[in-house]
Image: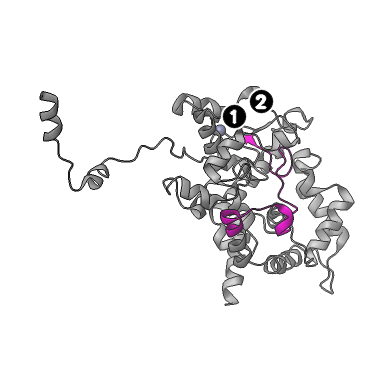
Amino acid sequence: MTQKTAATSITAPRDAGKQLALFRPLTILEWLPDETLYSLVARLHYLSGFRRESTTSNVLFGHPRAGLRHDFQHSVSEFERRTDGSLGSAEQILLSHTILPFFLCFSDREFSSDFIRSLADGYWDSSTLGRPFITGSTRGCNPLKACPACIKHDQETYGVAYWHRSHQFPGVWLCAVHDSLLMTVLASDSQSAKYKLRLPKMADLQGSSFETDSISMADGRRTFLRILRDSIHQATDDYSSLQVSSSSVVALFAIGAQEKGLTNSNGRLHIKRMGESYLDFISPIAGLTEFSEFLGHGDVTVSELARLLRGSPRRTHPLRYIFISLWLFGDFSTFRERLISRTTQHF
Ligand SMILES: [Zn+2]
């Protein structure tokens, strides 16, 4: 009787839905500072208890592999829908939690919007967009990197070690917070390693070749790596102002080469002088495997550089542009300001 009275005395509020909305939806995960999308997906995978990574990817992205590459994910719009936008829009996620902005530098806005759309909405692979410089290899252009000091700090502060975006940009090998050398995931190019969700663990990491190299890190190498890191972070933080065609960049390089006295009286590049100057500039990092894909060796480096400075229509890796800008203009800020000034004059 009491139960009946109690049951009948309960009346459903007319605006029950509104009352429910008074409660914040339970958020299982939020972004950690400087976290990559891959890292968040890996954390979700461990929390979910799913045995297979493909199940986690399917649940989050509607595709068994879309969320598993550590450098680029695709079908991010589907991820946005399935997380109800609580982690940001697809575009916000791609621009703030992946290394995409690095690859938008020195490319025009049409290319950038195509690239963002293809990662947000569809299946993407390097051959579709002709991006030979973007690889999914764990030791290729985009190795998965972590800072030992950040791992310790994050475990103590957040209870979990995670992947920082600022470590992942190509060419960055020093942590901006601790100035320590980054470590990489033990190399494996197998398909299963390429599509594996993992969080940073010291046991899975190996030191870079810097640590075993005979050249001391105390010499110009560390300085070079610091300047390079800061330039790359500056470029990616402000990628939108660097969205200019590669022909504009090369035109400014030609002026820089002339100002540096690397041209003949007829204005053509003095190949020997140019090669000597560039090889001297990159000498602190020459021979390191971490940069071999971007620098080549000796004559190859010089002929590649000459081809690029003569305005080759082939797209090149943004890191090469950053090397050249530092070489010709001394620092990245100067180059960036001159590039922006030139491109705005043309409109
Ligand atoms: Zn660190």
The residue positioned 81% from the left and 72% from the top of the image is 267
Q: Residues within 10 Å of mark 2 (few under 14, many from 20)?
A: few
Q: Position of residue 100 (x, y in %)?
A: 60, 52
Quadrant where the N terminus lies? top left
Q: Position of residue 291 (x, y in %)?
A: 75, 43
Cα separation between marks 2 and 1: 7 Å
Query: Disc 1 residue type?
Result: Pro
Q: Residues within 10 Å of mark 1 (few under 14, many from 20)?
A: many
On the rendering, which quadrant does ligand 1 occupy? top right
Give above or below for 36 relative to 95.
above
Q: Is 122 situated left or right of 34 in this image?
A: right
The residue positioned 34% from the left and 40% from the top of the image is 25
Q: Is 80 situated left or right of 181 in this image?
A: left
Q: Quadrant of residue 335?
A: bottom right
Q: Which residues are magenta?
A: 116-145
Q: Is 292 situated left or right of 90 in this image?
A: right
Q: Position of residue 7 (x, y in %)?
A: 15, 31
- Residue furthest bottom as drawn: 347
The residue positioned 44% from the left and 27% from the top of the image is 157
Total number of numbered labels? 2
The residue positioned 64% from the left and 64% from the top of the image is 111
Q: Considering the numbered disc 1 on the image, is that residue within a helix, a strand or a loop?
A: loop
- Which circle marks residue 200 in the picture? 1
Q: Nearer the viewer, residue 118 or 21?
A: 21
User: Marks 2 and 1: CB-CB under 8 Å?
Assistant: yes
Residue 313 in view in this figure: yes
Give above or below for 152 relative to 222.
above
Q: Is 215 situated left or right of 14 in this image?
A: right
Q: Which residue is disc 2 drawn over?
A: 204
Q: Position of residue 336 (x, y in %)?
A: 60, 61
